[in-house]
Amino acid sequence: MTWISERAELKLDMLHSLARSQKALARMIESLADVTEQSIDTAAGLRENIRAIAEYQRTMAEKVAEIELPDTVRRSTPSSPWTNGSLRVCGGSRMTSTQEEVESLRSSREQRIAGA
């Protein structure tokens, strides 16, 4: 077995492990909901365990995927919609064009394609 195939198999095993861990984490979260009604102290301990497991899973996923996941989700104000002036699209509705404008756009497009 080559080094590359061994590495791929190892990554696949880690992904299977992550999937099993996710299922276990889901069961823990369900039991947390049940335990919270009975004992706040037990729920707090379980919540801390879930946090630690989630952080471990995140680290494993980063190692397997060879990427770094951001610590927080960044939220910002959405930008305005992108419009394409050459298509004469504005505000979600098409503006009417004259036949000459349409032909001009077609010919300039064909020239760009021919030049490429």
Image (tube, helix red, strand yellow):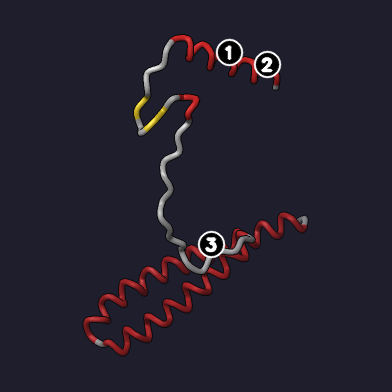
Residue 13, image x, y percentages:
59, 62
Amino acid carrying label 1: it is Ser
**Disc number placed over residue 14 in the picture, else none:** none
Q: Disc 2 on helix, strand or loop? A: helix
The residue pinned by badge 3 equals 16
Number of numbered discs overlaid on the protein picture: 3
Q: Nearer the N terminus, badge 2 or badge 3?
A: 3
Amino acid carrying label 2: it is Ala
Cα gap from disc 1 to disc 3, whole angstroms: 55 Å
Residue 109, image x, y percentages:
59, 18
User: Is 70 situated above or below 84?
Assistant: below
> CB under 8 Å between callouts 2 and 1?
no
Residue occupying the point 48% across, 67% down: 72
User: Is 14 situated above or below 50?
Assistant: above
The residue pinned by badge 1 equals 107
Amino acid carrying label 3: it is His
Q: Quarter of the image containing the N terminus?
A: bottom right
Cα gap from disc 2 to disc 1, whole angstroms: 10 Å
The residue pinned by badge 2 equals 114
Please rate how many residues cluster around mark 2, counting C-alpha atoms within 10 Å: few if below 14, some from 14 to 19, many from 20: few
Q: Disc 3 on helix, strand or loop? A: helix
Q: Nearer the N terminus, badge 2 or badge 1?
A: 1
